[in-house]
Image (cartoon, rainbow, N blue to C red):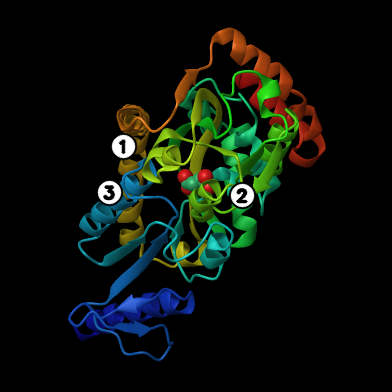
């Protein structure tokens, strides 16, 4: 009995020190005070593992809702041993520093748009190619394939990161202040905010517009003050951040995919007790299924709300013919990135088109 108890204590101390060594922050469940991560810290069996999850969007969006759902399920499936703390609306980190924060284990979860992952891993920019995916199912097929998904996820490990899932938001639409966007010529000379992605910059350059990379948190005021003329985003991001209140025209173009790589710190993740990790895996799987099934619905609902608000002068839905003209104008972007992204990945994406 004594021997068994001693072994249990040793196993417990070991797992705690692995977590502490990885920088996992812990909390005394009774008082809720953070006790830091010193190796010699006394811990009790009631210790909670804190998982900080930082993202940039509002709570009433596919990612915002998914984060809350993950928090609830993770706490349930780990029997309360994990305390997930969600920080929405760029409260904790902005787009540019969130991956570094995960690498340093200052936070344990982030779900940046794939475009932003491309700053560290240029190959991740493949989701940014204009009109690359006919629907979100095509993105899922890509992510489940060895040629694309496995390759993209495994490269994260080289930098102490681990991909846990892909969460869809949906397809981006264009907005502009000055005039409707119907033909490629309508883009000329207009300043568009882009996420930090060279492919997105090239997309706008292909139609003679001026791309301006900028964090999401700054877009509303940049539109309001006329620092930029337009932007591209999903309907849920446009509605929840009120971009439609500071723009006059929107074109439903569905020209580009916006999805998220849910990323954790490899050391942190691998240092978790197995049963805790299994609980988090289960929570992540269920949340991912929920986003897949509900992302589109949320975006559709937001289109209705944008229409109800009646702040835009016009919403134009791109016809098939107009879409083809946009595709032709933006097509050179694919060849432009063959070297940087890799011909094999670009060919794999083209196959899905
Ligand atoms: C953006 O910067 O426009 C998006 O990445 C925001 C988001 O995370 O959906």
Residue tagged 2: 227
**Res. 290 mark:** 1
The local secondary structure at tag 1 comes to: helix
Question: Between residues 46 and 221, which one lies in front from this camera angle?
Answer: 221
How many marks do you count on the picture? 3
Q: Does the residue labelled 1 lie within 8 Å of ligand 1?
A: no
Q: In this view, does 228 lie above or below 312?
A: below
Q: Is mark 2 within 8 Å of ligand 1?
A: no
3 and 1 marks in contact (CB < 8 Å): yes
Q: Does the residue labelled 3 lie within 8 Å of ligand 1?
A: no
Within-10-Å neighbours for mark 3: few <14, some 14–19, many 20+ = some
Please state the horizontal and vertical placement of residue 333, each as a whole percent of the image: 75, 29
Report which quarter residue 100 is drawn in.
bottom right
**Res. 167 mark:** none
Viewer-nearest of discs 1 and 2 = 2
Furthest residue in direction top, as rendered: 321
Question: Between residues 314 and 273, which one lies in front from this camera angle?
Answer: 314
Please state the horizontal and vertical placement of residue 179, each as a whole percent of the image: 58, 27
Q: Give how far apart the Cα atoms at labels 2 and 3 are.
A: 36 Å
Residue tagged 3: 69
The local secondary structure at tag 3 comes to: helix
Report which quarter residue 15 is drawn in.
bottom left
Please state the horizontal and vertical placement of residue 128, each as a whole percent of the image: 62, 35
> What residue is shown at x 34% (from left), y 77% (from top)?
26
> What residue is shown at x 36% (from left), y 32% (from top)?
306
Q: Give how far apart the Cα atoms at labels 1 and 2 are.
A: 37 Å
């Amino acid at each position: 009995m004594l021997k068994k108890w001693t072994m249990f204590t040793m196993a417990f101390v070991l797992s705690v020190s692995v977590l502490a060594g990885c920088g996992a922050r812990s909390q005394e469940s009774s008082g809720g005070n953070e006790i830091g991560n010193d190796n010699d810290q006394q811990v009790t069996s009631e210790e909670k593992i804190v998982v900080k999850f930082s993202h940039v969007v509002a709570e009433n969006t596919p990612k915002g809702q998914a984060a809350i759902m993950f928090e609830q399920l993770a706490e349930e499936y780990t029997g309360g041993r994990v305390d997930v703390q969600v920080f929405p609306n760029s409260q904790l980190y902005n787009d540019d520093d969130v991956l570094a924060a995960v690498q340093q284990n200052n936070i344990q979860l982030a779900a940046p748009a794939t475009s932003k992952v491309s700053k560290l891993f240029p190959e991740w920019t493949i989701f940014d190619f204009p009109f690359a995916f006919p629907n979100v199912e095509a993105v899922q097929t890509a992510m489940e394939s060895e040629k694309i998904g496995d390759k993209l996820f495994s490269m994260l490990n080289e930098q102490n990161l681990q991909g846990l899932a892909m969460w869809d938001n949906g397809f981006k639409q264009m907005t502009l202040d000055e005039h409707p966007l119907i033909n490629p010529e309508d883009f000329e000379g207009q300043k568009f905010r882009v996420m930090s992605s060279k492919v997105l910059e090239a997309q706008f350059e292909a139609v003679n517009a001026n791309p301006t990379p900028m964090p999401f948190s700054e877009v509303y005021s940049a539109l309001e003050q006329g620092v930029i003329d337009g932007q591209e985003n999903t309907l849920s991001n446009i509605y929840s951040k009120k971009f439609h209140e500071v723009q006059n025209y929107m074109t439903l173009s569905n020209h580009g995919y916006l999805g998220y790589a849910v990323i954790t710190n490899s050391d942190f993740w691998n240092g978790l007790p197995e049963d805790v990790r299994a609980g988090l895996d289960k929570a992540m799987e269920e949340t991912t299924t929920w986003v897949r099934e509900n992302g589109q619905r949320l975006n559709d609902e937001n289109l209705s709300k944008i229409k109800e608000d009646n702040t835009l002068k016009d919403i134009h839905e791109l016809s098939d013919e107009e879409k083809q003209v946009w595709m032709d104008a933006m097509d050179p972007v694919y060849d432009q990135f063959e070297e940087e992204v890799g011909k094999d990945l670009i060919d794999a994406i083209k196959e899905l088109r």
